[in-house]
Image (tube, helix red, strand yellow):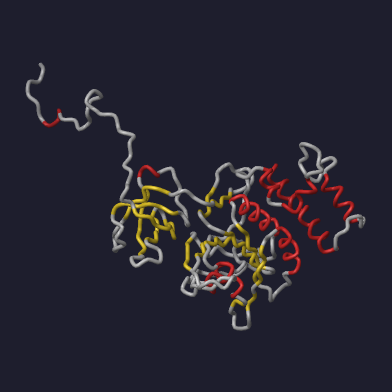
Amino acid sequence: MARTTIDESDFTSRPGKRGSRPRSKNRPEHKDAIPGFVTGVDRGRYTVLVDENGPDERYITAMKARELTRDRIVCGDRVDMVGDVSGADGSLARIVRITERTTVLRRTADDTDPYERIIVANAHQLVIVTALANPEPRTRMIDRCVVAAYDAGMDVILCLTKADLASPTTLRELYEPVGVTVLVTQRDDDESITPLDAIQQALAGKVSVFVGHSGVGKSTLVNALVPDADRATGKVNDVTGRGRHTSTSAVALRLPAHASREGDAAQAGWVIDTPGVRSFGLAHIDVERVLDAFEDLSLIIEDCPRGCTHLDEAPDCALDEWAHNAHSGNIDEDAQTLTSRIRRIESLRRLLSARTE
């Protein structure tokens, strides 16, 4: 017998297909959104600086809007926000737009991993922090960082720490000929880092990202440059020769105002400290772009046959002929330049071998 009465069990909150309206793909323009600078990322929450150096400068906490679910936001990003942008405790704004990035520094886990990891956005220069001893410097890591930075359109500074333990001469000769600025620091008897003036001048007015292996003194250097940074530091393991990860997330720290090398008025800059890395994959970079990072070898490579891989086993590679002539004394250049270029050839081939495997 059919029911003739209707009760609450007959109600459904899900509309029928005929009664539902298709979801609009139009999104609001958010013309009232305010701009900000992302200084920190922590589990889906973003610390954003608003009105930088202005009368209403403040930090706010924000989350991504639904339309940005698939977009990654990193330190250095310039974003637009709506919602509660007061910066009051407990307030939460919403990031609705990521402005166009001027530079993007990327890496992959290794040279076969297709997934790109964005490290930082809109940085002017990459500072590769490397210890001269304890742990020993790893030129392959330096080479990879240089290639990634040049691919991103960034300048490169190689900061050599612990010069009180070993000489920086070899690394200086290896990287200065290809346009890398080399700066050297050491620890004094009172454990302070010196000299800092050259580094402060190089960073003034720019956004700089610090990258390096764990234990090379990166966080110690950041603490010296930004006294209130309070970045955790650790010691190198005596057995493995590796450092312990102390920085767990990237964070942008404002530098004290410092006069530039040109004698301009004092200006501040930003340091983006990143967690220590053990690998720096280049799967996202084409081989031709790797070659672009070795400008000092470009004239030699022009004499290579078409399709040359420039690897050790490559037939008739012009790099081999040049190296042979250099060892035979048939090239009219000083010994220091020849030695440096031979080392650059070795670095290039290491990168190409790893990248093409």
The quadrant of the rendering that contains the N terminus is top left
Q: Is residue 271 left or right of residue 5?
A: right
Circle count: 0
Extreme-top residue of the structure? 1
In this picture, is 289 found above or below 60?
above
Tell me what residue is drawn at x 65 percent, y 42 percent.
Answer: 286
Q: Position of residue 74 (x, y in %)?
A: 47, 53
Extreme-bottom residue of the structure? 190
Foreground: 352 or 277?
352
Q: Position of residue 244 (x, y in %)?
A: 57, 64
In this picture, is 308 found above or below 343?
above
Q: Quadrant of residue 233?
A: bottom right
Q: Position of residue 230 (x, y in %)?
A: 48, 71
Q: Is residue 82 left or right of residue 142?
A: left
Foreground: 27 or 224?
27
Foreground: 41 or 35?
35
The quadrant of the rendering that contains the C terminus is top right
Tell me what residue is drawn at x 43 percent, y 43 percent.
Answer: 70
Q: Position of residue 159 (x, y in %)?
A: 64, 66
Q: Is residue 351 left or right of residue 237?
A: right
Tell me what residue is drawn at x 37 percent, y 62 percent.
Answer: 51
Q: Quadrant of residue 193?
A: bottom right
